Amino acid sequence: IEDNFHLCYELKQIHVAAENPYYSSKNGILYSKDGKKLLRCPPGYVFASADMVDGVEAIGESAFEFCKNLLEIDIPESVSIIEGFAFANCRNLTCVNLHSNVQMAGNGHFWCCKELDNVTYYNTDDVMPSNEFYNCENLKNIEIRCKTSSIGEGAFSGTALLEFTVPKGTKVIKRAAFMHCFALKTISIPRSVSRINESAFINCGKNYLTAEQKADGSYAWMGPDAYATFRVVAGSKADVFCQQKKYDVSYL
């Protein structure tokens, strides 16, 4: 039943009868019967972190999706897993405080969180999920405090990142990972990166095109497909990739 409320924008409370064998509720929020999994916060609910059940261990898929009144949230230490799209389309969410022992399962946890700004990111999985911050158009800075072996498809596409350092140990940067990051001026790529998808950086740094480049209608077709400065290790796979793509390169 929890899948049926995410477009009920004005819904403020969900109440479950005490004798229901499958679900429970507290403060108008839907939980599993044992209260260990938060299943659905009504989209019209005015949420405060203190409203969450003590000891909740999981936040379910799309649990807070479209919660227009969610401005910030502290994830309790008891929460060990957050499922995909948990905070997707929370258009007024500015701050999420994660902790180091949380697993970000699935994809797109912060999809289209338009006001999300600085983020300190944790994930016990070593993969940056696909579409994790897709179209978070106000996200200018992120600090990644976890191991990352790959950056998923569209992970930062459409964000306002100004600079980005790919974590050491990352091996793969997937399709559209930084696509349309127009404000991204510099991106640093460690030697560990062995594979970069062709479309990973399309239109990165587009804000920095010169007036002449903007006026040249053919430039978009003849020039590189990204305009950021790529900081790489000389002779690395990333260096070869950037040279082939005619990107602006400087060396670490």
Image (cartoon, rainbow, N blue to C red):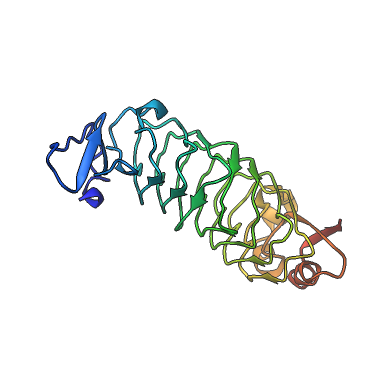
Residues 198 and 165: in front is: 165
The answer to whether 44 is drawn above or below residue 176 in the figure is above
Residue 181 in the figure: left or right of residue 58: right
Residue occupying image coordinates x 23% and y 36%: 25
**Res. 10 visible in picture:** no
Tally of numbered discs: 0
Image spot of residue 90 (x, y percent): 40, 40
Q: Residue 40: which quarter of the image?
A: top left
Residues 4 and 122: in front is: 122
Residue 247 in the figure: left or right of residue 197: right
Residue occupying image coordinates x 65% and y 46%: 145
Image spot of residue 29 (x, y percent): 27, 35
Image spot of residue 174 (x, y percent): 59, 66
Residues 20 and 68: in front is: 20
Quick one: quadrant of the C terminus?
bottom right
Q: Residue 27: which quarter of the image?
A: top left
